[in-house]
Image (cartoon, rainbow, N blue to C red):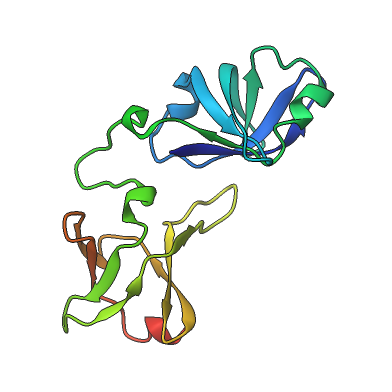
Amino acid sequence: MVVAEILRPRGNRGEVLAQSQTDVPGRLPELKRAHARLADGADVPVEITEAWVHDGAWVLKFAGVDSIGEAERFRGADVWIPADERGTLPEGEFFESDLLGCALVDAATGVQLGRLEGWQACGDRTQVGPPLMQLYVNGREVLIPFVPAICREVDLTTRTIRVALPAGLLDL
């Protein structure tokens, strides 16, 4: 399970700038051991000695990575942990990765609209909105907010999300 995407080296002590991809609050500051999937596909274990937020992004310091040159190796890498270490979420919350591929079904008609193919962030550094589900309806990309008013029921067993869409949402 990917918990962060490394953007680039940061500073001259070997830190990297990263974008959080985790749904678990407090995950990055508490994370000590993980793996990094490098751009060439290689997986390397990493020990995270420090993690803090700077200007809306995360700064991570890995043990043994002490220069810009050493940190450059991690540019574009994904920081990941095994699925059994991902933690638990409160009742009614879901890992975005678990919902990928779920069918979105119109709650009123029972018609399948499409399958959840990805997620997009909504907002900016100062205001974060709800995650947007990305799917294709009639060959067109559609973004639907993942909020209780729209997503009425999530059933991981049947891999369905029953939705009640506001009028005109599919026309945007």
Look at the picture and state if 101 lies above or below 112. Answer: above
At 63% from the left and 36% from the top, the residue drawn is 18
Q: Is residue 33 left or right of residue 168?
A: right
Choose top left, top right, bottom left or bottom right for residue 82.
top left
Choose top left, top right, bottom left or bottom right for residue 10.
top right
**Total tally of numbered discs in the picture:** 0
At 18% from the left and 76% from the top, the residue drawn is 107
At 71% from the left and 23% from the top, the residue drawn is 15
Residue 13 in the image: x percent, y percent?
78, 17
At 74% from the left and 30% from the top, the residue drawn is 73
Look at the picture and state if 147 lies above or below 109. Answer: above
In the picture, which quadrant includes the N terminus? Answer: top left
Residue 96 in the image: x percent, y percent?
37, 50
Residue sitting nearer the eye, 37 or 138 = 37
Q: Is residue 15 left or right of residue 93?
A: right
Residue sitting nearer the eye, 32 or 147 = 32
Q: Is residue 162 left or right of residue 119?
A: left
